[in-house]
Image (cartoon, helix red, strand yellow):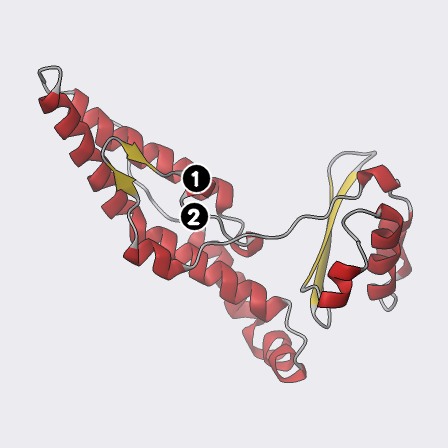
Amino acid sequence: MQYFGKGFRAGVIPCDHKGVYWFFTWTPTIKDHQNGLAQEPAKLKQYVLNKLENMPSYVRSFIENTELDAFHLAPLRHRHPWELIMKNISKGNVCAVGDALHPMAPDLAQGGCSTLEDGVVLARCLGEAFSKNLKEGEEEYKMIEESLKKYAKERRWRCIDLITRSYIVGSIQQSGSKLVNFFRDQILATFLADELLKKSEFDCGELK
């Protein structure tokens, strides 16, 4: 279950017959930071319950029954897409993968999947290099460097696409604007669902 409210989102999913995972995201104000929510779980719990006051009682019950030591507040991180356009993904025999390359909002549910894609592409590029008979030293280093450049070129626009779309989808879902919420609920709901499915069908190729 997932709920979109005025400037927040909340969701819950069962883990097993005894436990559930739930989340609550919102855009904090300066006052929220000053209230020390990150350091005081009791305040954080009450804050979430206040935000969910209009939600069904069974939704609130998940939060009410959560122990204080289970509350954890962390900011969502993402990389600006233009950084991937303007900056290097690889340099020499070093490259960025996973969250070091494409930290993103979780709204497309592709953070972990895209890291696996990185691994497949990186392994393929390096495998092609090491399948050749290379002399140790400068020749080997050069081939590794070129392999990482190839990896960076192949992953750059896929990562830019995921980062951008995750941010846009999250902004629409979490909007506090009545106009945006109307279009989201009445027009964009099907489109957003399709976007989630399309992004999970990406083919990063095979390992040979």
Quarter placement of the N terminus: bottom right
Q: How many marks?
A: 2
Q: Are marks 1 and 2 in contact (CB under 8 Å)?
A: yes
User: Image check: 59 left or right of 160?
Assistant: right
- The amino acid type, in three-letter code, at marker 1 is Gly
Q: Give me the disc on residue 191.
A: none
> Residue 3 is drawn in which quadrant?
bottom right
Tell me if residue 206 comes above or below residue 111 in the rendering.
above
> Residue 184 is drawn in which quadrant?
bottom right
Closer to the camera in the image, 56 or 48: 48
* Residue at disc 2, secondary structure: loop
* Residue appearing at x 45%, y 49% in the figure: 200
* Residue appearing at x 43%, y 59% in the figure: 80
Quarter placement of the C terminus: top left
Please provide percent x and percent y for residue 154.
25, 46
- The amino acid type, in three-letter code, at marker 2 is His
Tell me if residue 82 comes above or below residue 22 in the rendering.
below
Closer to the camera in the image, 179 or 68: 68
Please provide percent x and percent y for residue 18.
83, 34
Please provide percent x and percent y for residue 5.
73, 69
Instruction: Give the alpha-carbon distance from disc 1 to disc 2, as whole Å.
Output: 6 Å
User: Image check: 12 left or right of 199?
Assistant: right
- The residue tagged 2 is 102
- The residue tagged 1 is 98
**Residue 205 appears anywhere in the view:** yes
* Residue at disc 1, secondary structure: helix
